[in-house]
Amino acid sequence: MFIVEFIKNAINRIDKNVNAMTLIEFLLVSSMYSIMKFSDPQWFVENSVVENIQIAVLAIAFLICLTAKSERKFFVFCGFLVLFLIIRETNLGRSYFCAKYLEPDEICRWKNLKYGYMADVVRILFAVSILAYAVYNKLWLPLRRFISKAPIYIWDLGVVVLCAVIGTIAETSYIDSEILEETSETIMYIAFTYCLWRYSRYRFEN
């Protein structure tokens, strides 16, 4: 019965409204083929134009989390997750260390640097810290509240899921397209940031 009631409740909470930002997301998704066809491939390599755009979008997402109007501890947790994504995109500045300490013909990998293993240590410690923060503050409670009571912005969330799927497929050997992967990832981050904005400004009635 709980599952049936949850599904009924979820259907009633679906928000099908399309606003200007949602239209921009639709436009970006519909432009993916053109981006792949006409863009300079160098824009999509590590530490280039598209990656810097992604980091800028994630920085905005981080600020949104810090300025949430309600459930502040939950959105601080979301901010930590965003920081983790920024760490992933910047790879802790790996390209800088490679340029400084590796020979030009060496592959830029942390394992090729003398203390490169520390990068994995930092990532693991940060992930454990995020988990500890969530457990200490019992963040499953506000999460359950959002899942059971907040509006479901179907179009924006749909773009996040769609681009996540496309980006994952683009990484496989069947497609192996860095341009498609990075394009999907960028659009996903934009839609994700807008979702954070909408939910961080939402106030529950009770």
Image (cartoon, rainbow, N blue to C red):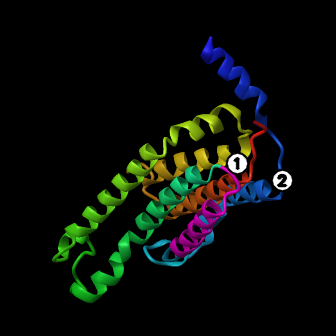
Task: Identify the image quadrant of the N terminus.
Answer: top right
Q: Is residue 93 left or right of residue 162?
A: left
Where, by quadrant of the figure, is residue 63 drawn?
Answer: bottom right
Q: Residue at x 42, y 43 (%)?
A: 135
Task: Give the residue at mark 1.
Answer: 156
* Place of residue 81 in the rendered image (x, y in percent of width and height, measured from the top left): 48, 56
* Place of residue 109 in the rendered image (x, y in percent of width and height, measured from the top left): 26, 71
Instruction: Work out whether 172 lies above or below 20.
Output: above
Q: Residue at x 43, y 73 (%)?
A: 46
Question: Circle 2 sits in a helix, a strand or a loop, which is it?
Answer: loop
Which of the labelled discs sits on residue 190, or is there none?
none
Instruction: Work out whether 137 lies above or below 119.
Output: above
Q: Is residue 4 left or right of residue 19?
A: left
* Place of residue 38 in the rendered image (x, y in percent of width and height, measured from the top left): 62, 71
Q: Which residues are magenta?
A: 50-70
Q: Is residue 7 left or right of residue 47?
A: right
Question: Circle 1 sits in a helix, a strand or a loop, which is it?
Answer: helix
Instruction: Work out whether 137 lies above or below 184.
Output: above
In space, the residues marked 2 and 1 are separated at their CA atoms by: 10 Å
Task: Give the residue at mark 2.
Answer: 19
Residue type at mark 1 is: Asp
